[in-house]
Amino acid sequence: MNYLYFLYIEFLAKHNIPQLFGDITFYVIPCCIIFAALLIVVLALVLFERKLLGWFTQRKGPNRVGFWGLLQTLADAFKLLCKENITPKGADRFLFNLAPIIIFVPVMVALGLIPYSSEFTFMNFQTNLLIFIVIGAMPVLSILLAGWASNNKYSLFGAMRSVSQILAYELPIAFVILSVAVLASSLNLSQITLAQSSAKGIFGWFGIPCFIGFVIMFICVIAELNRCPFDLPEAESELICGYNTEYSGMRFAIFYLSEYALLFANALLLAVLFLGGYLSPFGKYLSPMIFPPEIGSILVYFEQAFWLFAKSFLIIFVIIWIRATLPRLAAFDLLKFSWACLLPLSILNLFLMVILKYLTGGGYV
Amino acid sequence: MFKDIKYLILSMLTVFKHLFKKPVTLEYPEKRNIPPENFRGKPVVENCKCCGICTRVCPSGAITIDKENKVFKIDLKKCIFCGNCAYYCPHGAIKMSKEYELGTKEKEALVLNYKIGGADERN
Amino acid sequence: MSKLKLNLGPQHPSTHGVLRLILELDGEKIISCEPDVGYLHRGMEKMAEKLTYIQYLPLVDRIDYLAGFFYSELLCRTVEKALEIELSPRVKAIRVLLLELNRIASHLLWIGAFLMDLGAVSPFFYAFREREIILQYFEKISGQRMMNNYFVFGGVRRDIGYLEDVENFLKILPDKVNDYEKLITENPIFLQRTKGKGVLDKKTAFNFAITGVNLRASGVSLDFRKGDYLYKDFEFTPVVLEEGDSWARYKARVMEIRESAKIAAQALEILKREKSIEQTLINPLTLKLPEGEYFQEIEAPRGLASIYVKSTGDSKPYRLKWRTGSYYSVNLLRKILKGAYLNDAIAISGSLDIILPEVDK
């Protein structure tokens, strides 16, 4: 990041712009980039999911708007934009309008914490991982607000279920993350990524020693995202649409899109923690081998981002696959599953990782 | 526990299998199913002899025969396409055609007027 | 203890139509359930008094749009019994074939809808894929997909054809049902949602006059196809399961699909053997039922369906009443949902295979 920062300051100095301006704007630019990229990724993700669900069920998926249905999500978003925003009678107006705003902020912050390539992390703190976890659980606040403010019994049920679900599934996540932190001896996502680098490529990833943790984290992430089979807060056949039953127009679109943004952010986190982040699965980057060195040394960064995105999309693919297959869990089974199965397993996993770390003499691999 | 995981994986693989199968859906306006031979679409009348049996078997009263003006009227707003009239017509004058896209903007177009004893004519 | 009153329906994604359940909840636990029916009332019974039998026949398909053949069969049978018309073996075989195909289609749709209630997406489309084959076959022979109006008094509209379609379908069906079973039957989440949920014991089932698959899944071997004159020459065993929970009702329906496929295959054999179709043609203008009361029953996909006709010797019935299976299942919700949780309630009411046009008539 420092490298980019100096490049930027240098660029500004050339054009006689004071450094103060650069200091301030340097942190604004990434936000804009994130926001633009996020919108594109989310729109693509919605299409990706609909296409995949279509293919899983022997349909074609959206293929009318634009070539191959590429503009479908855009058209949907535009349609929602044109629709009337209805605030139901008896709803708490202020909270009702506040909820969709709150949900989008944590996602953006969370995306800024991810190391996209070795030189490209928007916010590189020492405790990146911890911040991510804290922020990643924040959307539940918005869901609770939305459910409470809607003045609808179904919404309230959805919100309550969501809160109990998050409470149950945050704890196993914490233990799994601790075990990863033990393996990498760091809470910084960049350093966790680097700790997974080895000449053997795929065998250096934490997903292999910490496989139990990976599976637990995967399940918990699905639960945290309120996705099938843990989509109780918005179980459409029970609670109609759960917490966003009463939302319409753009407010609903924000809920809908933020869900996908969160999905993307969490998939990125999973990829960083267990699948080696931006590291190449072959142990070496391919671009310096294919291209001449002067281009290759720059293309490496893009290749790193490519690997990260490929891994996260693989994770998203599996999540959608699960959605296509499994029925929804019952509310009480869901809590039982977390407290009685996932939590003990995650603690066991932590023990195993500590022992592994001890045996390998402080450095795994 | 292991049995559960086994069945979970089995069911996931069953779904995965379908990823490579050909879609079964038809993209409607471009491609469409050809209506079968006995399809019950828009009723068509030819060579009516004014016996009136069709009006008596029609469940919804969609058919009226105006003997004076020699007009055979079928109100498609009322018609339920049951095919009773075509089945019970002793002269085989009423036939169910294969036409089924009958949506229109004008109400009047949904009342079919057939001339009795002449070439059929639509209002 | 404060109670929460929740209005489930009439517009709700999982009530399969317009059923309204007034639930009293304690948390998510249901204290009492009051079903409110009648949102889809079309006056099917009153309408019969104004229409001749021939006019009424096409409307009967609409009582249960997923199993229309059964209700036309009932009305046809009443008239045939009253006028003492004998059906030829080919006509009987045609009717059995179509009834069983219709039963398969109805159960397939139920599997899809039930799994949709539970939150699984794919089985819905897979089941519809197979149902589509049946519906297209119906369209080929009768002219429409669901409102077939194919049976007439004394026979069928026209001779059946396209038998190779049915043959091909019956060939692929077991594989497809195996696919569903792989996907659903032993799925741990599905088991959790259905095993031991909504248990219906024999006594309650009898008290609430439950029939059909729901009763057979509770361990009572009562299948009205046994003893039905159409099914006299067919060999089949009624599916009976002991558990009486949602899972048993699911399993019983899957098994019944296989059983129905066997009956349909037997009917195909007869159709290949008996080539001549002899039908008694009825003059539509002079059809009158002799004075008296008539009662007929048949095993429909959603339980016993029966018809009662009182005739004064006119061309129109004096009174006509239907008994439909779903109506009793809706009544059962009052009892069976008590003490269940909200998300189980959806699964239980889904497993009973309630279809609202049949309830409201």
Image: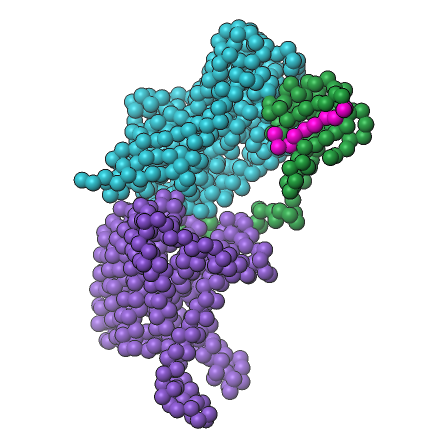
Chain colours: A purple, B green, C cyan
Q: What is the tally of numbered marks visible in this picture? A: 0
- Is A253 positioned to the left or the right of A75 in the image? left
- Identify the residue shown where x is 54% and y is 82%: A291
Nearest to the observer: residue B15 or residue A144: A144
Magenta span includes C278: no
- Is C57 positioned to the left or the right of A298 in the image? right
Nearest to the observer: residue A98 or residue C230: A98
Q: Residue A179: horizontal and vertical position, in percent?
A: 25, 67
Magenta span includes B72: yes
Quarter of the figure with residue C161 = top right
From this view, report whether residue A145 is shown above or below residue B83. below
- Is C56 positioned to the left or the right of C39 in the image? right
Q: Residue B71: horizontal and vertical position, in percent?
A: 74, 26
Nearest to the observer: residue C272 or residue B47: B47
From this view, report whether residue A332 is shown above or below residue A263. above
- Identify the residue shown where x is 58% and y is 12%: C315
Q: Residue C289: horizontal and vertical position, in percent?
A: 56, 9
Q: Residue C25: horizontal and vertical position, in percent?
A: 26, 39
- Identify the residue shown where x is 39% and y is 23%: C211
Q: In which quarter of the image is the C terminus of chain A?
A: bottom left
- Which residue reaches farthest left? C1
From this view, report whether residue C145 is shown above or below residue A296. above
* Residue A61 visible, this angle: yes
- Identify the residue shown where x is 57% and y is 18%: C51
Quarter of the figure with residue C302 = top left
Nearest to the observer: residue C88 or residue A85: A85
* Residue A3 visible, this angle: no
From this view, report whether residue A136 is shown above or below residue A32. above
- Is A220 positioned to the left or the right of B57 in the image? left
Give the residues in magenta: B69-78
Q: Quadrant of the N terminus of chain A?
A: bottom left
